[in-house]
Image (cartoon, grey):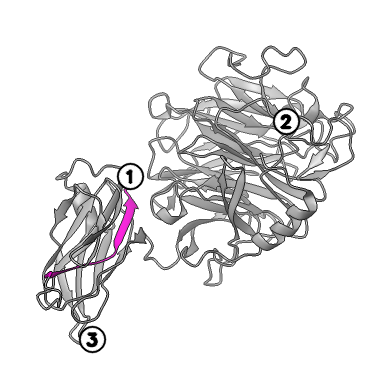
Amino acid sequence: MIRTPHLALAAALTGVLAATAPAQQALTTVRVASGLYRPVTATSPPGEYERIYIVEQNSARILVMNNGVINPTPFLSVSGVQGGGNEQGLLGLAFHPDYQNNGKFYVNYTGTLGSGDTFVVEYTAASPDVANPTPGPTIITFNQPQSNHNGGHLAFGPDGKLYIGTGDGGASNDQGTGHVAGGNAQFGGNLLGKMLRLDVDIAAPYIPADNPFILDGTVRDEIWSLGLRNPWRYSFDRETGDLYIADVGQNQREEVNFEPAGAGGRNYGWRCMEGFNCTGLSGCTCGIGLTDPIIDYSHGLGCSISGGYVYRGCAIPTLLGTYFYADFCSGRIWSLEYDSTSGTVMNATDRTAELAPGGGLAINTVSGFGEDGNGEIYILDFGPSFGAPGQGEIYKIVPGDGQDAGAFYCAGKTTSQGCVPFLTAQGVPSVTSTVPFRVTSNDLVLGEAGFYIYGINGRSNLNFHGGKLCVKSPFQRLLPAKLATDAMTPPCSGRILTNFNNRIQNGSDPLLTAGQRVYMQLRQRDPSEPAGFGDNLTDGIDFIICN
Protein backbone atom coordinates (compact mmCIF):
# COMPACT_ATOMS: atom_id res chain seq x y z
CA MET A 1 0.00 0.00 0.00
CA ILE A 2 1.46 3.36 -1.02
CA ARG A 3 1.97 5.75 1.89
CA THR A 4 2.32 9.36 0.76
CA PRO A 5 2.79 12.44 2.96
CA HIS A 6 -0.61 14.05 3.22
CA LEU A 7 0.31 17.51 1.91
CA ALA A 8 1.84 16.05 -1.22
CA LEU A 9 -1.17 13.80 -1.74
CA ALA A 10 -3.59 16.66 -1.32
CA ALA A 11 -1.78 18.67 -3.94
CA ALA A 12 -1.83 15.72 -6.30
CA LEU A 13 -5.52 15.08 -5.80
CA THR A 14 -6.38 18.70 -6.48
CA GLY A 15 -5.09 18.08 -9.97
CA VAL A 16 -6.42 14.61 -10.67
CA LEU A 17 -9.90 15.18 -9.29
CA ALA A 18 -10.27 18.33 -11.34
CA ALA A 19 -9.17 16.62 -14.54
CA THR A 20 -11.65 16.14 -17.31
CA ALA A 21 -12.45 12.69 -18.65
CA PRO A 22 -10.01 11.21 -21.17
CA ALA A 23 -10.87 12.24 -24.71
CA GLN A 24 -11.29 8.66 -25.87
CA GLN A 25 -13.95 7.91 -23.25
CA ALA A 26 -17.27 9.49 -24.19
CA LEU A 27 -19.92 8.91 -21.51
CA THR A 28 -23.24 10.31 -20.42
CA THR A 29 -26.22 9.21 -18.35
CA VAL A 30 -29.84 8.48 -19.14
CA ARG A 31 -32.64 8.45 -16.59
CA VAL A 32 -34.16 4.99 -16.24
CA ALA A 33 -36.37 5.49 -13.15
CA SER A 34 -38.03 8.38 -11.33
CA GLY A 35 -40.67 9.02 -8.67
CA LEU A 36 -38.69 7.09 -6.02
CA TYR A 37 -38.40 7.68 -2.28
CA ARG A 38 -34.71 7.81 -1.30
CA PRO A 39 -33.23 4.97 -3.42
CA VAL A 40 -30.10 3.54 -1.77
CA THR A 41 -29.48 0.25 -3.60
CA ALA A 42 -30.10 -1.12 -7.10
CA THR A 43 -28.94 -4.65 -7.81
CA SER A 44 -29.75 -7.86 -9.66
CA PRO A 45 -29.55 -11.48 -8.51
CA PRO A 46 -26.95 -13.75 -10.10
CA GLY A 47 -28.29 -14.95 -13.44
CA GLU A 48 -30.92 -12.20 -13.74
CA TYR A 49 -30.50 -9.93 -16.78
CA GLU A 50 -33.91 -8.28 -17.13
CA ARG A 51 -34.82 -7.20 -13.59
CA ILE A 52 -33.18 -4.68 -11.28
CA TYR A 53 -34.28 -4.54 -7.64
CA ILE A 54 -34.40 -1.07 -6.09
CA VAL A 55 -34.31 -0.40 -2.33
CA GLU A 56 -36.18 2.67 -1.04
CA GLN A 57 -34.79 3.73 2.32
CA ASN A 58 -37.74 5.47 3.98
CA SER A 59 -40.65 3.60 2.43
CA ALA A 60 -38.92 0.29 3.32
CA ARG A 61 -39.93 -1.10 -0.07
CA ILE A 62 -38.03 -3.13 -2.64
CA LEU A 63 -39.25 -2.37 -6.17
CA VAL A 64 -38.70 -4.37 -9.34
CA MET A 65 -37.69 -2.63 -12.55
CA ASN A 66 -38.34 -5.11 -15.34
CA ASN A 67 -36.85 -4.19 -18.72
CA GLY A 68 -36.95 -0.51 -17.78
CA VAL A 69 -40.46 -0.46 -16.29
CA ILE A 70 -41.11 -0.46 -12.53
CA ASN A 71 -43.72 -3.03 -11.52
CA PRO A 72 -46.79 -1.48 -9.84
CA THR A 73 -46.59 -4.04 -7.01
CA PRO A 74 -43.48 -3.91 -4.80
CA PHE A 75 -41.33 -7.00 -4.58
CA LEU A 76 -41.40 -6.62 -0.78
CA SER A 77 -42.47 -4.11 1.86
CA VAL A 78 -40.36 -4.78 4.93
CA SER A 79 -42.20 -4.39 8.22
CA GLY A 80 -40.76 -3.19 11.53
CA VAL A 81 -38.39 -0.65 9.97
CA GLN A 82 -37.37 2.44 11.92
CA GLY A 83 -36.97 5.19 9.33
CA GLY A 84 -37.17 8.43 11.28
CA GLY A 85 -33.54 9.53 10.90
CA ASN A 86 -31.74 10.53 7.73
CA GLU A 87 -29.47 7.50 8.10
CA GLN A 88 -32.03 4.98 9.32
CA GLY A 89 -34.44 2.81 7.36
CA LEU A 90 -34.12 -0.04 4.87
CA LEU A 91 -30.45 0.19 3.95
CA GLY A 92 -29.23 -2.95 2.21
CA LEU A 93 -30.17 -5.87 -0.04
CA ALA A 94 -28.14 -8.85 -1.24
CA PHE A 95 -29.23 -11.93 -3.15
CA HIS A 96 -27.86 -15.35 -2.26
CA PRO A 97 -25.31 -16.62 -4.83
CA ASP A 98 -27.68 -19.56 -5.47
CA TYR A 99 -30.80 -17.37 -5.56
CA GLN A 100 -31.99 -18.88 -8.84
CA ASN A 101 -32.44 -22.20 -7.02
CA ASN A 102 -33.14 -21.31 -3.38
CA GLY A 103 -34.84 -17.89 -3.76
CA LYS A 104 -33.06 -16.50 -0.68
CA PHE A 105 -32.15 -12.86 -0.21
CA TYR A 106 -31.14 -10.68 2.73
CA VAL A 107 -32.06 -7.19 3.90
CA ASN A 108 -30.39 -4.84 6.37
CA TYR A 109 -32.52 -2.32 8.24
CA THR A 110 -32.79 -0.33 11.45
CA GLY A 111 -35.72 -1.70 13.38
CA THR A 112 -38.44 -0.30 15.58
CA LEU A 113 -37.32 -2.92 18.07
CA GLY A 114 -34.50 -1.39 20.06
CA SER A 115 -35.35 2.06 18.65
CA GLY A 116 -33.08 1.73 15.66
CA ASP A 117 -31.01 -1.40 16.25
CA THR A 118 -29.58 -3.14 13.18
CA PHE A 119 -31.26 -6.27 11.81
CA VAL A 120 -30.05 -8.49 8.97
CA VAL A 121 -32.91 -10.81 8.01
CA GLU A 122 -33.41 -13.58 5.44
CA TYR A 123 -36.42 -13.62 3.09
CA THR A 124 -37.39 -15.82 0.16
CA ALA A 125 -38.93 -15.01 -3.21
CA ALA A 126 -42.33 -16.41 -4.19
CA SER A 127 -41.63 -15.45 -7.82
CA PRO A 128 -39.16 -13.17 -9.60
CA ASP A 129 -41.58 -10.28 -9.06
CA VAL A 130 -43.00 -10.91 -5.58
CA ALA A 131 -41.36 -12.03 -2.33
CA ASN A 132 -42.87 -14.01 0.51
CA PRO A 133 -43.71 -11.26 3.06
CA THR A 134 -43.01 -13.54 6.03
CA PRO A 135 -39.41 -13.07 7.19
CA GLY A 136 -37.07 -15.97 7.70
CA PRO A 137 -34.36 -16.15 10.33
CA THR A 138 -32.64 -13.07 11.68
CA ILE A 139 -29.01 -13.59 10.70
CA ILE A 140 -27.61 -10.99 13.09
CA THR A 141 -28.81 -8.05 15.17
CA PHE A 142 -26.94 -5.55 17.34
CA ASN A 143 -27.48 -2.28 19.17
CA GLN A 144 -27.06 1.16 17.59
CA PRO A 145 -26.29 3.86 20.19
CA GLN A 146 -27.34 6.79 17.97
CA SER A 147 -29.46 7.19 14.85
CA ASN A 148 -26.56 7.89 12.47
CA HIS A 149 -23.59 5.88 11.16
CA ASN A 150 -25.52 2.66 10.62
CA GLY A 151 -23.64 1.49 7.53
CA GLY A 152 -26.22 -0.97 6.29
CA HIS A 153 -24.89 -2.23 2.99
CA LEU A 154 -24.81 -5.95 2.20
CA ALA A 155 -22.80 -7.83 -0.43
CA PHE A 156 -21.86 -11.42 -1.10
CA GLY A 157 -18.19 -11.86 -1.83
CA PRO A 158 -16.66 -14.17 -4.44
CA ASP A 159 -16.19 -16.66 -1.59
CA GLY A 160 -19.98 -16.93 -1.17
CA LYS A 161 -19.93 -15.26 2.25
CA LEU A 162 -22.13 -12.33 3.28
CA TYR A 163 -20.25 -9.10 4.09
CA ILE A 164 -21.99 -6.62 6.41
CA GLY A 165 -20.63 -3.09 6.80
CA THR A 166 -21.33 -1.38 10.11
CA GLY A 167 -20.86 2.21 11.25
CA ASP A 168 -19.21 3.23 14.51
CA GLY A 169 -22.52 3.82 16.30
CA GLY A 170 -23.03 7.48 15.49
CA ALA A 171 -22.61 10.88 17.11
CA SER A 172 -19.17 12.33 16.24
CA ASN A 173 -15.56 11.28 16.72
CA ASP A 174 -16.74 7.82 17.81
CA GLN A 175 -17.31 8.93 21.39
CA GLY A 176 -20.12 9.57 23.85
CA THR A 177 -23.01 7.38 24.95
CA GLY A 178 -22.61 3.83 23.64
CA HIS A 179 -18.98 4.36 22.59
CA VAL A 180 -16.06 2.77 24.44
CA ALA A 181 -12.84 4.55 25.32
CA GLY A 182 -10.74 4.76 22.17
CA GLY A 183 -13.82 4.34 19.98
CA ASN A 184 -16.00 1.45 18.87
CA ALA A 185 -14.23 1.15 15.52
CA GLN A 186 -10.97 0.16 17.24
CA PHE A 187 -12.59 -2.06 19.89
CA GLY A 188 -12.76 -5.72 18.94
CA GLY A 189 -15.37 -6.52 21.56
CA ASN A 190 -18.33 -5.08 19.65
CA LEU A 191 -19.53 -5.09 16.05
CA LEU A 192 -19.59 -1.34 15.38
CA GLY A 193 -17.21 0.29 12.90
CA LYS A 194 -16.42 -3.04 11.28
CA MET A 195 -16.78 -5.24 8.23
CA LEU A 196 -18.45 -8.49 9.28
CA ARG A 197 -18.31 -11.76 7.34
CA LEU A 198 -20.90 -14.52 7.82
CA ASP A 199 -21.74 -17.82 6.16
CA VAL A 200 -25.51 -17.99 5.76
CA ASP A 201 -25.28 -21.61 4.58
CA ILE A 202 -24.21 -22.95 7.96
CA ALA A 203 -26.01 -23.01 11.30
CA ALA A 204 -26.31 -19.92 13.51
CA PRO A 205 -24.31 -17.94 14.52
CA TYR A 206 -23.12 -18.31 10.87
CA ILE A 207 -19.43 -17.67 11.65
CA PRO A 208 -16.97 -19.05 9.05
CA ALA A 209 -14.11 -21.05 10.48
CA ASP A 210 -11.59 -19.06 8.45
CA ASN A 211 -12.53 -15.58 9.70
CA PRO A 212 -9.28 -13.78 10.57
CA PHE A 213 -9.82 -13.20 14.30
CA ILE A 214 -11.15 -16.63 15.27
CA LEU A 215 -8.12 -17.30 17.47
CA ASP A 216 -8.00 -13.79 18.96
CA GLY A 217 -9.94 -13.71 22.19
CA THR A 218 -10.10 -9.90 22.18
CA VAL A 219 -11.95 -9.64 18.84
CA ARG A 220 -15.44 -10.90 17.99
CA ASP A 221 -15.41 -13.87 15.63
CA GLU A 222 -17.84 -12.21 13.19
CA ILE A 223 -15.33 -9.46 12.38
CA TRP A 224 -13.49 -9.46 9.04
CA SER A 225 -11.86 -6.03 9.37
CA LEU A 226 -12.12 -3.01 11.65
CA GLY A 227 -11.37 0.71 11.83
CA LEU A 228 -14.32 1.99 9.74
CA ARG A 229 -16.42 5.06 10.52
CA ASN A 230 -19.45 4.63 8.28
CA PRO A 231 -18.84 2.44 5.20
CA TRP A 232 -21.40 3.87 2.79
CA ARG A 233 -21.30 1.34 0.02
CA TYR A 234 -18.65 -1.19 -0.83
CA SER A 235 -18.39 -3.65 -3.67
CA PHE A 236 -16.39 -6.56 -5.01
CA ASP A 237 -14.74 -6.35 -8.41
CA ARG A 238 -16.51 -9.06 -10.42
CA GLU A 239 -13.31 -10.06 -12.20
CA THR A 240 -10.66 -9.91 -9.46
CA GLY A 241 -12.69 -10.31 -6.25
CA ASP A 242 -10.99 -7.21 -4.78
CA LEU A 243 -13.03 -5.17 -2.32
CA TYR A 244 -13.50 -1.37 -2.55
CA ILE A 245 -14.86 0.36 0.58
CA ALA A 246 -15.98 4.00 0.59
CA ASP A 247 -15.85 5.28 4.18
CA VAL A 248 -17.55 8.54 5.18
CA GLY A 249 -15.29 10.96 7.09
CA GLN A 250 -15.90 13.27 10.03
CA ASN A 251 -15.18 16.91 9.20
CA GLN A 252 -12.15 16.83 6.90
CA ARG A 253 -11.59 13.87 4.55
CA GLU A 254 -13.55 11.25 2.60
CA GLU A 255 -11.77 8.04 1.57
CA VAL A 256 -11.75 4.94 -0.61
CA ASN A 257 -10.15 1.81 0.84
CA PHE A 258 -8.93 -1.16 -1.18
CA GLU A 259 -8.69 -4.76 0.02
CA PRO A 260 -7.16 -7.47 -2.19
CA ALA A 261 -9.40 -10.51 -2.57
CA GLY A 262 -9.43 -12.55 0.63
CA ALA A 263 -7.18 -10.19 2.59
CA GLY A 264 -9.17 -9.85 5.83
CA GLY A 265 -7.88 -8.85 9.24
CA ARG A 266 -7.14 -5.24 8.28
CA ASN A 267 -7.49 -2.08 10.34
CA TYR A 268 -8.54 0.96 8.27
CA GLY A 269 -7.59 3.44 10.96
CA TRP A 270 -10.67 5.28 12.21
CA ARG A 271 -10.77 7.03 14.68
CA CYS A 272 -7.10 7.96 14.86
CA MET A 273 -7.01 8.50 11.08
CA GLU A 274 -9.42 10.23 8.71
CA GLY A 275 -8.30 9.68 5.17
CA PHE A 276 -4.54 10.23 5.24
CA ASN A 277 -4.88 12.63 8.19
CA CYS A 278 -3.98 11.84 11.79
CA THR A 279 -6.87 13.06 13.92
CA GLY A 280 -5.08 13.21 17.27
CA LEU A 281 -7.74 10.96 18.81
CA SER A 282 -6.87 7.86 20.83
CA GLY A 283 -7.56 4.24 19.99
CA CYS A 284 -4.64 3.43 17.70
CA THR A 285 -1.37 4.93 16.50
CA CYS A 286 -1.10 6.57 13.09
CA GLY A 287 1.08 4.63 10.68
CA ILE A 288 1.40 1.53 12.85
CA GLY A 289 -0.58 -1.57 11.86
CA LEU A 290 -3.06 0.43 9.81
CA THR A 291 -4.08 0.26 6.15
CA ASP A 292 -4.16 3.61 4.36
CA PRO A 293 -6.85 4.44 1.81
CA ILE A 294 -5.90 4.48 -1.85
CA ILE A 295 -7.35 7.96 -2.30
CA ASP A 296 -9.07 10.65 -0.24
CA TYR A 297 -10.49 14.11 -0.83
CA SER A 298 -11.18 17.17 1.27
CA HIS A 299 -14.47 18.69 2.32
CA GLY A 300 -13.79 21.42 -0.17
CA LEU A 301 -15.05 18.91 -2.74
CA GLY A 302 -17.93 17.40 -0.76
CA CYS A 303 -18.86 16.06 2.65
CA SER A 304 -20.07 12.43 2.39
CA ILE A 305 -18.72 9.79 0.02
CA SER A 306 -20.94 7.28 -1.78
CA GLY A 307 -19.07 4.24 -3.05
CA GLY A 308 -19.78 2.51 -6.33
CA TYR A 309 -18.53 -0.34 -8.49
CA VAL A 310 -15.70 -1.38 -10.75
CA TYR A 311 -17.11 -1.38 -14.26
CA ARG A 312 -17.26 -4.91 -15.70
CA GLY A 313 -20.09 -4.40 -18.16
CA CYS A 314 -20.14 -5.10 -21.86
CA ALA A 315 -21.51 -1.90 -23.41
CA ILE A 316 -18.35 0.19 -22.87
CA PRO A 317 -15.23 -2.01 -23.06
CA THR A 318 -12.86 0.97 -22.76
CA LEU A 319 -14.23 1.45 -19.22
CA LEU A 320 -13.31 -2.02 -17.95
CA GLY A 321 -11.55 -1.93 -14.57
CA THR A 322 -12.71 1.62 -13.76
CA TYR A 323 -14.09 2.26 -10.25
CA PHE A 324 -16.81 4.90 -9.77
CA TYR A 325 -17.60 6.85 -6.61
CA ALA A 326 -19.32 10.15 -5.77
CA ASP A 327 -20.16 12.65 -3.06
CA PHE A 328 -23.65 12.90 -1.63
CA CYS A 329 -23.41 16.59 -0.68
CA SER A 330 -21.79 18.09 -3.76
CA GLY A 331 -23.06 15.65 -6.39
CA ARG A 332 -19.55 15.25 -7.81
CA ILE A 333 -18.81 11.94 -9.53
CA TRP A 334 -15.32 10.52 -9.99
CA SER A 335 -13.65 7.44 -11.37
CA LEU A 336 -10.23 5.84 -10.99
CA GLU A 337 -8.28 2.75 -11.87
CA TYR A 338 -6.13 1.00 -9.26
CA ASP A 339 -3.00 -1.07 -9.88
CA SER A 340 -2.81 -3.26 -6.79
CA THR A 341 0.62 -4.60 -7.74
CA SER A 342 2.29 -1.19 -7.59
CA GLY A 343 -0.25 0.43 -5.26
CA THR A 344 -0.88 3.17 -7.79
CA VAL A 345 -4.06 5.11 -8.50
CA MET A 346 -4.33 5.85 -12.23
CA ASN A 347 -6.62 8.01 -14.34
CA ALA A 348 -8.37 9.63 -11.37
CA THR A 349 -10.99 11.69 -13.17
CA ASP A 350 -13.79 14.09 -12.30
CA ARG A 351 -16.69 12.92 -14.50
CA THR A 352 -19.39 15.20 -13.06
CA ALA A 353 -19.87 17.35 -16.14
CA GLU A 354 -19.53 14.42 -18.53
CA LEU A 355 -22.20 12.39 -16.73
CA ALA A 356 -24.71 15.25 -16.49
CA PRO A 357 -27.85 13.93 -18.22
CA GLY A 358 -28.91 17.22 -19.85
CA GLY A 359 -32.38 17.86 -21.21
CA GLY A 360 -33.43 19.73 -18.08
CA LEU A 361 -32.47 16.81 -15.82
CA ALA A 362 -29.79 16.89 -13.12
CA ILE A 363 -28.06 14.51 -10.74
CA ASN A 364 -28.30 16.17 -7.33
CA THR A 365 -27.52 14.05 -4.26
CA VAL A 366 -25.81 10.77 -5.09
CA SER A 367 -26.95 8.28 -2.48
CA GLY A 368 -25.18 5.34 -4.08
CA PHE A 369 -24.64 3.31 -7.21
CA GLY A 370 -26.26 0.23 -8.70
CA GLU A 371 -25.09 -2.66 -10.86
CA ASP A 372 -27.24 -4.86 -13.08
CA GLY A 373 -26.75 -8.45 -14.15
CA ASN A 374 -24.63 -7.42 -17.13
CA GLY A 375 -22.29 -5.32 -14.99
CA GLU A 376 -23.62 -1.97 -16.21
CA ILE A 377 -23.53 0.81 -13.61
CA TYR A 378 -26.30 3.11 -12.36
CA ILE A 379 -26.25 6.31 -10.28
CA LEU A 380 -28.83 6.68 -7.50
CA ASP A 381 -30.07 10.20 -6.76
CA PHE A 382 -32.29 11.38 -3.88
CA GLY A 383 -33.36 14.36 -5.96
CA PRO A 384 -33.17 18.13 -5.38
CA SER A 385 -34.94 18.26 -1.99
CA PHE A 386 -32.73 15.92 0.04
CA GLY A 387 -34.81 12.82 -0.39
CA ALA A 388 -38.38 14.11 -0.47
CA PRO A 389 -40.94 11.44 -1.44
CA GLY A 390 -41.24 10.93 -5.17
CA GLN A 391 -38.10 12.85 -6.13
CA GLY A 392 -35.62 9.97 -6.25
CA GLU A 393 -34.18 9.01 -9.63
CA ILE A 394 -31.83 6.45 -11.16
CA TYR A 395 -29.49 7.18 -14.06
CA LYS A 396 -27.59 4.66 -16.16
CA ILE A 397 -24.05 5.32 -17.38
CA VAL A 398 -24.05 4.86 -21.15
CA PRO A 399 -21.84 5.66 -24.15
CA GLY A 400 -21.87 9.40 -24.74
CA ASP A 401 -22.51 9.33 -28.46
CA GLY A 402 -24.30 6.03 -28.95
CA GLN A 403 -21.39 4.88 -31.09
CA ASP A 404 -19.11 3.50 -28.40
CA ALA A 405 -20.46 -0.02 -28.07
CA GLY A 406 -16.95 -1.36 -28.59
CA ALA A 407 -13.34 -0.31 -28.33
CA PHE A 408 -11.72 0.67 -31.62
CA TYR A 409 -8.08 -0.13 -32.35
CA CYS A 410 -5.66 -0.82 -35.19
CA ALA A 411 -5.47 1.38 -38.33
CA GLY A 412 -7.53 1.27 -41.49
CA LYS A 413 -5.78 1.13 -44.88
CA THR A 414 -6.09 4.07 -47.25
CA THR A 415 -8.28 3.24 -50.24
CA SER A 416 -7.45 3.94 -53.89
CA GLN A 417 -9.72 6.97 -53.55
CA GLY A 418 -7.56 8.37 -50.75
CA CYS A 419 -10.00 7.60 -47.93
CA VAL A 420 -9.36 5.68 -44.73
CA PRO A 421 -12.22 3.26 -43.98
CA PHE A 422 -13.38 3.05 -40.36
CA LEU A 423 -15.94 1.21 -38.26
CA THR A 424 -18.76 2.52 -36.11
CA ALA A 425 -21.01 0.50 -33.81
CA GLN A 426 -24.39 1.13 -32.23
CA GLY A 427 -26.35 -0.94 -29.76
CA VAL A 428 -25.17 -3.69 -27.43
CA PRO A 429 -23.99 -7.16 -28.49
CA SER A 430 -26.32 -9.58 -26.73
CA VAL A 431 -27.49 -13.19 -26.74
CA THR A 432 -31.09 -12.18 -25.95
CA SER A 433 -31.74 -8.53 -26.88
CA THR A 434 -34.07 -7.76 -29.77
CA VAL A 435 -32.24 -4.44 -30.25
CA PRO A 436 -29.71 -4.70 -33.13
CA PHE A 437 -25.96 -4.40 -32.64
CA ARG A 438 -25.01 -2.69 -35.88
CA VAL A 439 -21.40 -2.60 -37.03
CA THR A 440 -20.97 -0.27 -40.00
CA SER A 441 -17.92 0.14 -42.25
CA ASN A 442 -17.63 3.68 -43.60
CA ASP A 443 -15.62 5.54 -46.28
CA LEU A 444 -15.24 2.47 -48.47
CA VAL A 445 -14.68 2.13 -52.21
CA LEU A 446 -18.06 2.78 -53.77
CA GLY A 447 -20.02 -0.23 -55.00
CA GLU A 448 -17.47 -2.93 -54.08
CA ALA A 449 -18.35 -5.98 -52.01
CA GLY A 450 -16.65 -6.98 -48.80
CA PHE A 451 -16.94 -9.25 -45.80
CA TYR A 452 -16.35 -9.02 -42.06
CA ILE A 453 -13.84 -11.20 -40.25
CA TYR A 454 -14.07 -11.86 -36.55
CA GLY A 455 -12.31 -13.99 -33.97
CA ILE A 456 -11.95 -14.55 -30.23
CA ASN A 457 -8.18 -14.97 -29.86
CA GLY A 458 -7.17 -11.37 -29.42
CA ARG A 459 -6.08 -8.25 -31.24
CA SER A 460 -3.55 -8.28 -34.04
CA ASN A 461 -1.56 -5.57 -35.77
CA LEU A 462 -0.05 -7.71 -38.50
CA ASN A 463 1.11 -6.15 -41.77
CA PHE A 464 -1.14 -7.52 -44.50
CA HIS A 465 -1.67 -6.42 -48.12
CA GLY A 466 -0.32 -2.96 -47.38
CA GLY A 467 -2.61 -2.51 -44.37
CA LYS A 468 -3.14 -4.09 -40.97
CA LEU A 469 -4.83 -7.36 -40.11
CA CYS A 470 -6.49 -6.47 -36.81
CA VAL A 471 -7.93 -9.87 -35.84
CA LYS A 472 -5.71 -12.68 -34.63
CA SER A 473 -6.28 -15.96 -36.47
CA PRO A 474 -8.09 -18.25 -36.62
CA PHE A 475 -11.10 -16.16 -37.55
CA GLN A 476 -14.49 -16.53 -39.18
CA ARG A 477 -15.97 -14.78 -42.22
CA LEU A 478 -19.31 -13.00 -42.08
CA LEU A 479 -21.06 -11.71 -45.18
CA PRO A 480 -22.64 -8.29 -44.60
CA ALA A 481 -26.37 -7.84 -44.30
CA LYS A 482 -26.43 -4.73 -46.45
CA LEU A 483 -24.31 -2.81 -48.94
CA ALA A 484 -25.23 0.86 -48.71
CA THR A 485 -24.03 3.89 -50.67
CA ASP A 486 -24.64 7.60 -50.71
CA ALA A 487 -24.27 8.93 -54.27
CA MET A 488 -24.33 12.50 -52.99
CA THR A 489 -20.94 12.21 -51.30
CA PRO A 490 -18.47 10.48 -53.63
CA PRO A 491 -15.82 9.25 -53.70
CA CYS A 492 -15.74 7.86 -50.12
CA SER A 493 -19.40 6.92 -50.05
CA GLY A 494 -19.31 3.14 -49.72
CA ARG A 495 -20.83 1.67 -46.56
CA ILE A 496 -21.30 -1.93 -45.49
CA LEU A 497 -23.24 -2.83 -42.36
CA THR A 498 -24.33 -5.87 -40.39
CA ASN A 499 -26.42 -6.62 -37.31
CA PHE A 500 -23.99 -8.84 -35.45
CA ASN A 501 -26.68 -9.88 -32.95
CA ASN A 502 -28.12 -12.02 -35.73
CA ARG A 503 -24.87 -13.99 -35.82
CA ILE A 504 -24.74 -14.23 -32.03
CA GLN A 505 -28.32 -15.42 -31.70
CA ASN A 506 -28.77 -17.78 -34.68
CA GLY A 507 -26.58 -20.50 -33.14
CA SER A 508 -24.29 -20.89 -36.15
CA ASP A 509 -21.21 -20.13 -34.04
CA PRO A 510 -21.28 -21.84 -30.61
CA LEU A 511 -18.31 -19.73 -29.43
CA LEU A 512 -20.40 -16.55 -29.44
CA THR A 513 -21.66 -16.79 -25.86
CA ALA A 514 -22.31 -14.29 -23.08
CA GLY A 515 -19.10 -12.89 -21.66
CA GLN A 516 -17.05 -13.71 -24.77
CA ARG A 517 -14.82 -10.95 -26.16
CA VAL A 518 -14.91 -10.65 -29.96
CA TYR A 519 -12.50 -8.90 -32.36
CA MET A 520 -13.75 -7.75 -35.77
CA GLN A 521 -12.87 -5.80 -38.94
CA LEU A 522 -13.92 -5.60 -42.62
CA ARG A 523 -12.05 -6.63 -45.77
CA GLN A 524 -13.20 -5.15 -49.08
CA ARG A 525 -12.17 -5.46 -52.73
CA ASP A 526 -10.38 -2.46 -54.19
CA PRO A 527 -9.47 -3.28 -57.80
CA SER A 528 -7.97 0.18 -58.33
CA GLU A 529 -5.57 -0.15 -55.40
CA PRO A 530 -2.24 1.07 -56.85
CA ALA A 531 -0.03 -1.42 -55.02
CA GLY A 532 -1.95 -4.25 -56.65
CA PHE A 533 -3.07 -5.93 -53.47
CA GLY A 534 -6.70 -5.70 -54.52
CA ASP A 535 -8.32 -5.16 -51.14
CA ASN A 536 -8.70 -2.75 -48.23
CA LEU A 537 -8.97 -3.20 -44.47
CA THR A 538 -10.84 -1.13 -41.90
CA ASP A 539 -9.71 -0.55 -38.34
CA GLY A 540 -10.70 -3.13 -35.70
CA ILE A 541 -13.33 -3.22 -32.98
CA ASP A 542 -13.47 -5.44 -29.93
CA PHE A 543 -16.52 -5.94 -27.75
CA ILE A 544 -17.95 -8.22 -25.08
CA ILE A 545 -21.18 -10.12 -25.62
CA CYS A 546 -23.83 -9.37 -23.00
CA ASN A 547 -26.58 -11.63 -21.79
Residue range of the region highlighted in magenta in the rendering:
533-547
Give the x, y percent position of residue 132. 48, 29
Residue ID for mark 1: 547
Tag 1: Cα neighbours inside 10 Å, few (<14), some, or many (≥20)? Answer: some
Give the x, y percent position of residue 425. 31, 63
Give the x, y percent position of residue 263. 60, 28
Helix or strand or loop: what does disc 2 sit on?
loop
Magenta stretch containing residue 544, yes or no? Answer: yes
| Residue 489 placement, left or right of 402 | left
Magenta stretch containing residue 100, yes or no? Answer: no
Q: Which image quarter: residue 190?
A: top right
Q: CA distance from mark 3 to mark 1?
A: 38 Å
- Residue that appears at 32% across and 55% down: 542
462 relative to 340, above or below: below
Residue ID for mark 3: 489
| Residue 367 placement, left or right of 497 | right
Question: In front of the other: label 2 or label 1?
Answer: 2
Which label's residue is closer to the chain start, 3 or 1? 3
Q: Which mark is residue 267?
A: 2
- Residue that appears at 36% across and 66% down: 403
545 relative to 241, above or below: below
What's under tag 2, amino acid-wise?
Asn
What's under tag 1, amino acid-wise?
Asn
What's under tag 3, amino acid-wise?
Thr
| Residue 380 placement, left or right of 169 | left
Give the x, y percent position of residue 386. 70, 56
